[in-house]
Structure formats: C-alpha cells, structure tokens
Amino acid sequence: MLRNRHFWFGFIGTLLLVGLGWWAWDRFRPYAFHGTVLQSNEPAPDFTLMSANGPVSLSDFRGKIVLLYFGYTFCPDVCPTTLTELKRAMEVLGDDADQVQVIMVSVDPERDTPEKVQEYVEYFWPTFLGVTGTPDQIAEVATQYGIYYEKREVPGATGYLMDHTATVTVVDKDGYIKLIFPFGTPGEDIAADLKYLIDH
C-alpha cells in the first residue's frame, strides 16, 4: 500500500512538473511573427496627404498600430483581396481593432479623389482611411516606403491599370516600421501579429 502511494505521488508530481514546464515554455518562448520583421532605428517617414475630411499625417496616429497599403479604387483584384483580408483581421481582433488604423494611399491620383478613395475603403471596414495627393506627393511617399507603381495602358473602359507593390507595411505604436505582410497573408495571421504588438 505504501509503495503504491509513493508511486502515485511520484506520478502526479511528474505530471505537475511536465505541465509546469510546458506552460513556462509556451509562455516565454519568442513569438514567431507571420509577417516579415524589420528592425529599424529610424522612425517611419512621416507624410501628409489628403483625406475626404482634410489633411492627414501618419504622425496623427501615434499610439495606434498603422497598416499602410498602397492601392487604387480601379484595382480589379489585388486591392480588394488585400482589403478583404485586412477586414478579416479587424473582425478577429474584435474590440482591439480600435487600436489599429488601416490607411490606403492611392497610387492613382489622376482618378482617385479623396472622396472616392474613402468611399472605396469604407466598403470594407468603416474605420479604414483612404488618402491621396498630387502625383509628386504620392511618388515621394511611395519612394520613402519602397513602393513600386507604374501606369499600364490596357484596352477597355478603364483606359489603364496601375501595376504596384502589394505588400502591407505595419508601423508600430511608437512610429517604427515593424512588419511587412506579403500579398496573400491570411487575415487570421495578420490579426495574430497585430494582437501581439498590441499586447507588447
């Protein structure tokens, strides 16, 4: 009887130690981001562009996580796909979505007015913000963030399309570029990374 008791005490103790070890490993292991991590000692370049409600600067959103996306309203596939995944990320975040600001910068200033861009992004999520500017302003901001875009003439009603980089740039609460999400990153993965940044 005593031997059995010692066995069970030892067995239960082993289970407790294994459970505690697993808990500690799971809690303190480094988080593995889904996006590509960028380490920069310089803040993200600030800019001021025009929204439907007036000038907007990146620095206006210090304290929030900002997701920068460069697209345009006539985009047939890539832009709506990306914005749909960003919408999904906001849904997954729930109440924490209030700590995230999505900004779409138009790379088609010839056709995209501030009002048109805002109407477009609001279709996906009510707090998404659309901004545009002069061709020179857009070119400067795109260059600062390593974004490529170019007009491509096509037959049809739209007249032309814009080839452009399809990544999403994540600026953390302190104003530093933290992550790059490649095109096709699922909304659930985006939300997981954003949740970690919100909590840390």
Image (cartoon, rainbow, N blue to C red):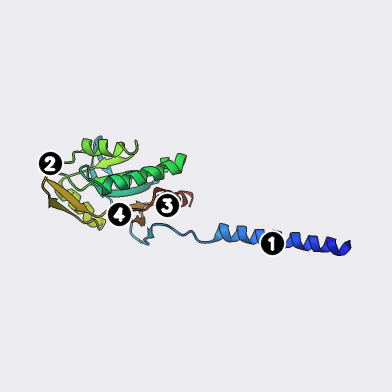
Q: Residue at x 72, y 63 (%)?
A: 14
For the residues labelled 4 and 2, the Cα–Cα distance comes to 27 Å
Label whose residue precedes the other's in the sequence (3 or 4):
4
Asked which secondary structure carries label 4, the reply is loop
Estimate how packed mark 1 is, as few (under 14), some (14 to 19) or many (20 or more) residues with alpha carbons within 10 Å.
few
The three-letter code of the residue at mark 1 reads Leu
Identify residue type, mark 4: Thr
Nearer the viewer's eye, disc 1 or disc 2?
2
The residue that label 2 is drawn on is 157
Left or right: where 153 falls relative to 55: left
Contact (Cβ within 8 Å) of mark 1 with mark 2: no
For the residue pair 9 and 4, the one nearer the viewer reads as 4
Question: Which kind of residue does numbered mark 3 sit on?
Answer: Asp
Q: Quarter of the image holding residue 130?
A: top left
* Mark 2 residue crowding within 10 angstroms, few (<14) / some (14–19) / many (20+): few
Q: Residue at x 80, y 63 (%)?
A: 7
Residue ID for mark 1:
17
Element class at badge 3: helix
Mark 1 and mark 4 lie on one chain; the one further toward the N terminus is 1
Question: Could you tell me which secondary element the residue under label 1 belongs to?
Answer: helix
Residue that numbered label 4 is attached to: 167
Q: Position of residue 147 (x, y in %)?
A: 24, 56
Work out how far the residue at label 2 is from the one at label 3, CA to CA, in angstroms: 36 Å
Point out the tag, 1 or 3, that comes first from the N-terminus. 1
Q: Nearer the viewer, residue 153 or 104?
A: 153
Residue under label 3, please give it.
Answer: 189
- The disc, 1 or 2, on the residue closer to the chain's N-terminal end is 1
- Name the quadrant of the N terminus: bottom right
- Neighbour tally class for label 3: few under 14, some 14-19, many 20 plus, Cα within 10 Å: some
**Label 1 to label 4: alpha-carbon separation:** 44 Å
